[in-house]
Image (cartoon, rainbow, N blue to C red):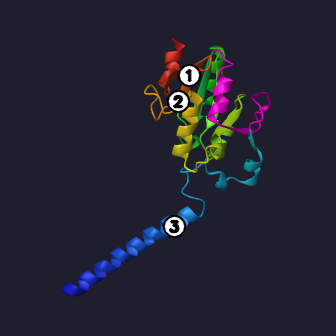
Amino acid sequence: MKVRINSISKMKIKCVYLFVYLTFFSLTSCGGVLDLTNDYGVLTEDWKEIIVPLKSFEEVKREQITKINGYQLKEELKRYPKALVYVISNQRQEIVSLRELELQMYERKCKLFLVMDGYLFVSSTFNQPVYSPIFSIDNGYYNKKYKSTYKRYFINDMLGNAKLSSRVKKDDFLYYFEDGVLKKSGKYSLLNDLAK
């Protein structure tokens, strides 16, 4: 009887391994696990039609999503005495009201750049009532598939660093610049610091 229980247990373990393998294979072969990449593949054609590459910042339209890389943004930031870049993860927005953020930056005479790190739940950002254009990180420019990698490259390029500065934490999502030079980075509390 003991031999039979061991063989049944081994069979159950093999079935579990097979199930896990098949689940992982099916998820990765159908476009990937959501939020590991930029999730462009899960967008409808209507969304894909409004995603355009940057030609120039003067031609950016609010009714489109403009793909940019960190170098392009770095050069544009130099044009503004004060600017705030918010790198947005749509599915877990740390700042729920982009309109409120936009008004705060307008009152402080600070240019706001809203940059999505991917397209999962794109409507939660794009459909907010803001005047500022919406950008997205151009992962194709970096030739990187995974969000954590191309996002790191984007931030490094935006900051002009070969590697992330010690002042910048990996999970920061707000970046405050003066004349194109990073002065502070952080989370929501950074906005309180800017108010002082």
Q: Nearer the viewer, residue 125 or 133?
A: 133
Dot 2 or dot 1: first in sequence order is 2
Point out the frontmost of discs 2 and 3. Answer: 2
Farthest residue, direction top:
196
> Dot 1, how many residues are within 10 Å of its Cα: few (below 14), some (14-19), or many (20+)?
many
For this view, does 103 lie left or right of residue 160? right
Image point (49%, 67%), residue name: 23
User: Relative to 110, does residue 155 appear above or below in the rendering?
Assistant: below
Q: Earlier in the sequence, mark 3 or mark 1?
A: 3
Number of other residues with Cα within 10 Å of mark 3, as a class: few under 14, some 14 to 19, many 20 or more: few
| Residue with the mark numbered 2 | 161
**Separation of marks 2 and 3 at Cα, in angstroms:** 37 Å
Percent of width and height locating residue 151: 55, 40
Tag 1, which secondary structure?
strand
* Residue that numbered label 3 is attached to: 25
Q: CA distance from mark 3 to mark 1?
A: 42 Å
In the image, which residues are magenta?
54-81
Verify CB contact (< 8 Å) between mark 3 and mark 1.
no
Question: SS at mark 3?
Answer: helix
Residue under label 1: 176
The kind of residue tagged 3 is: Phe
- Queried whether the magenta region covers residue 8, the answer comes back as no
Whether residue 8 sits left or right of residue 114 in the image: it is left
Q: Residue at x 56, y 58 (%)?
A: 32
Q: Is residue 176 visible?
A: yes
Is the residue marked by circle 2 packed among few (<14), some (14-19), or many (20+) residues within 10 Å? few
Residue 194 position in % (x across, y down): 53, 16
Q: Which residue lies at the image location 69% right of the left edge and 19% below the top edge? A: 79
Q: Nearer the viewer, mark 2 or mark 1?
A: 2
Percent coordinates x, y for residue 24 in the rendering: 49, 65
